[in-house]
Amino acid sequence: MKKKGAFGRLLAIKGAGSVLTAFIGLIVIYVAFGIMNPKVFSIMNIQNLLRSMSKYLLIGIGQSFVMITGNIDLSIGSVVGMSAMTSATLMTRGVNPFLAILLTILCGLIVGVVNGFLVGKFKLPPFIATLGTMFVARGIGYIVNGNRNTDNIASGIGKEAGDAFQNFFYYGKFAGVFNTFWIALVIFLVFFFLLAKTRTGRHIYAIGSNVDAARLSGVDVILTTTKAYLVSAFCSVVVGLILAAQAGMGNMDAGNTYEMYGVAAGVIGGVSPLGGSGILLGTFAGAGVWQILENGLNMVHAQVGIQRIVIGVIVVMAVLLDVVMRTNDKKGFKKKS
Amino acid sequence: MGEKIVSMEHITKEFPGVKALDDVHFELEAGEVMALLGENGAGKSTLVKILSGVYTLDHGSLNIFGKDYKTLTPNMAREAGVAIIHQELNMCRDLTVCQNMYLGREMKSGFVLNNAKMEKEARKYLDELGVDIDPRQVVGDLPVSKQQMIEIAKALSINAKILIMDEPTSALTSREIEELFQIIHRLKNQGCGIVYISHRLEELAHIADRVTIMRDGRFITQGNYADFTMDEIIANMVGREIKEKFPKVVCPRGEKVFEVKDLNAGRLVRDISFSLYAGEIVGVAGLMGAGRTETTRAIFGVDPKQSGQIFLDGKEITINGPMDAIRAGVVLAPEDRKKDGLCTKLSIRQNIALPNLDVIGGKSGIINKKTENDMCDKAVRELAIKTPNLEVDAATLSGGNQQKVVVAKWLARNSRVVIFDEPTRGIDVGAKVEIYHLMNQLKQQGIAVMFVSSEMPEVMGVADRIIVMCDGRITGELKGGEATQEEILRLATSFENKMAREDEED
C-alpha cells in the first residue's frame, strides 16, 4: 500500500480535485476582475459579494443533495417564490413574523415530501415529478395573494417588526458581514456535517451511486430520497425569506430559474449530476465562482447578454474538464480480458 | 455433515404471467457446499432471492436456523445470517471499500459516523481473507475479482452463516478461482453453509458436497455430488441426454477470407497476425487479461489501432470505426450482450434493423416496413429465435436467444467474417449447444467464424483451429482435434512470471 500524506489523503477523497480546481478558479477570476477594476477588492464589494453569494450557496446546497442521490429538483425556484409570497402575505395580514416563518417552512417542506415520495416511492423520473411540483408551487405562490404581488410587509405587522424581519434576513450585519451570509454559513455547516459525517449522508451517496445495491444493503431508499428533497426544500424556503426581506414584500416571480443556478453551483464545484459523488465544499466554491463572475462582470460593465454567455460557457467547461480527466484516468487503469 | 440450517418446502412464486417456482424443495446444512444447478430460467436466482429476502414467497414454508419466516425482508435475512454475493456485483462504485462493506449498518458514535472503527474492522476481515485491499480505495477503481472479495469480506463482517454465491467465478482468472475455492473451503470448515450457483459444471468437482437440480421452476433432484456423473447432472438439468456436447460439422476448408497482419493497439494487442478461412471456426483461448477482447475490439474499430493491416479477400481494408467494419462485412458479437450487444429497451425488430437501416431505409432514409419485417422474420426463422413476436423487448429474452438476436443483426447483411466474444457466457447448457449449431451453420455458409472463449472444453470441442493468446501476444496455434488442455494452458501462461508481477501491482 502506498503511504500518503495528509494533503494527499485529502486529495484522494472522490471529487476533491474538482473542488480544488473550483477554488483556484475562484481566486483567479476574482483577482482578474480586481485588476480590471480595483473596486472589486473594496470592503463594501466583498460584503455585497458574500451576501449575494449566500442565495446561490443555499440553492446549491439543496440541489447538490438531490443531485448526489442521482436526481434533480426543478421545483426549487418555485418553492423560493412560493415562500416569499406566503411569508409576505401572512405578514401583510398581520401574522406574527415568527409564526409566518414557521408556516412558510412547513409549506415548503410539504413540497419536499411530495417530491421525495413521487421520486422515491412511485419512481417517477425526477425531471417529470419535480417539473409538476414546480408548476404547482409557482401556482400556489400566485394564488396566496390573489394573483398579485403583496404590499409592504410593514403594512400588516408594523414598521418595527417589518424592519426587524428585513434586517434579520438581509440588511443587518454581524461582525461586519451581512446576516444573510451568516445564515447561509450556519446552514452550510449543518448540512456539510450531515452529508459528510452521518449515516444519512452516507446513504445519500449510496443511492446515487447504485440504488439497487443500496436497497439490498438495507438502505431505506424512499426515506433517504425524501430527506434529500427536504433539504432542498428547506434551503429554498430560506432563500424565499431572504428575497422577501430584501424587497420588503412578496414578488410572485421571485426565484424564477433558481433551480438551474443550483445545478450550476454544484456542477462547477464537482458534484456529479449523475449522482454518487461530490462534496458540499465544492458547492461552496461553485456558488462563489458564480457570484464573483456575476459581480465582476457587473463591475467591468459587461452587458447582461455577455454575462449569460460567460456563465454558460463556464458551466459546460467545468463538466467537460471533469469528463476529460475521468476519461484519462480510465485509460491509465484499463484492464480487461 | 452438520445440522440443517435452511429448509424450504413447497415454495411457490408467481410473477405476472409466469410461474417462476412451483413446489420447490431446498435445504442446506452447516459446513457444506450445496451446488444449485439448472439452466437459465430454471428458477435458481428466484429461489435464492427468496432466501435472501429480496422476493417474498407466495406459498410454502421457509425455515432458517430452526426459525420459520412468513415474511422475510433483506434486513431480516441479513440478521438471520444470510448473505448473497450477486452475479452482477452489486456495489456502489463511487463509495470506498469500507463504505460499501458497512452500507446500511454504519457504525456511529453519537450522530457521527465512526470511520476509523469501520476501517479497522474492514481491514480485519480483508486480512482474514488474505487479500491486499485498502479499505479506503474507491470500489469502482478495483478489478471485478477484488470487488468480489469485498463482497465476501462484507458477508464475513455480518457474521453470515449462509453464503449464497451466484456465478462467482464467471469473471475470474484461474488463479483467482483457486483463491476463491480456498476461501470457500475455509468458510465451510468454519461451519458456514454455502449455496453455490454456477454454469461451469467442471468446477463442481473441486468444491461441491451436494447438488440440488432444478428445471423450469421445479425441483428435480438432490443428492451427494459424488453419486452423480456429469452426464447425469446435465441430463437432469436439461431433461434429456445430450448425446454430443459439442456438435462438430466437418466441411472443407476454403479460401482465405480474412487476414490480420502485425496489429498493435495498446499493451494488450501486440503484433497480432492471423488468418481466417472460409468453412472453419477459429477459437481464441487464453486467460483473463490475455488481450483477446481487446484484439476483437481493435479489429472491429471500437478501439484505435496503432499499426497493422487488415485484408479481406486479399484486398486491404481500412477500419477506423465500427461502421467501416460493418460495411466491409466484418462484424462482432461483443462480450457483454446487455451492455454492448443489444439495446435492451428496444424490440427485437428494432434491434435487428439497427445496423441495417441503410438497407431498409434505402436512399430516402424512410424505413420500409415491409423490408424490415421480412428481414426480421427471416432472421428469427433461420436462427430459431424463441419469441412470441418481433415486438418483444430484447431484455425479456433468455441469454441464448439474446445472443441469437445479436447474430441476427449481422446476418441480415451478408457479413463475411463473424467474431464472437464469449458467446456462451452466462447461458445454459441447452442454449450453448444451439449457439454451437449456429456457429456451425455460419461455417457451412462459408462465413469465417472466430470466437473468443474462456471455456477450454468449448474451444477444443467446437473450433477447427485454436489460437492461444497470452499477455497481448499470440503464443501459439493448435489444431482443434489434436489440442490438449495441458498444451493450451502451457501456451496461455507463457508469460506467467511477468503476469504474476503485474497482478501484484493493482
Image (spheres, rainbow, N blue to C red):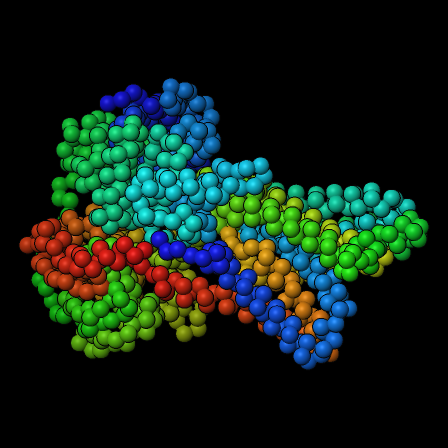
In the displayed structure, A256 sits above or below B247; it is: below
In the displayed structure, A91 sits above or below A45; it is: above
Q: Measured from the top left, where is residue A163 in percent x and y? A: 88, 54
The residue located at (56%, 41%) in the rendering is B112
The residue located at (38%, 31%) in the rendering is B159
Quarter of the image holding residue B141? bottom left
- Which residue extends farthest left? B482
Q: Measured from the top left, where is residue B319 in percent x and y? A: 29, 73
Q: Measured from the top left, where is residue B116 in percent x and y? A: 47, 43
- The answer, for residue B258, to whether it is visible in the render is no
Query: Which one is in front, B280 or A66?
Result: A66
Q: How many numbered tags mark residues here?
A: 0
- Which residue extends farthest front? A5
The residue located at (32%, 55%) in the rendering is B506
- Which residue extends farthest bottom? A36
Query: Which one is in front, A255 or B234?
Result: A255
Drawn side of residue B155 relative to residue A130, left or right: left
Q: Measured from the top left, where is residue A264 in percent x and y? A: 61, 63
Quarter of the image holding residue B231? top left
Looking at the rendering, in which quadrant would you find the N terminus of chain B? Answer: top left
Query: Which one is in front, A100 or B501?
Result: B501
Query: Which one is in front, A232 or A165?
Result: A165
- The answer, for residue A71, to whether it is visible in the render is yes
The residue located at (42%, 62%) in the rendering is B369
In the displayed structure, B352 sits above or below A37; it is: above
Drawn side of residue B158 relative to residue A67, left or right: left
Quarter of the image holding residue A49? bottom right
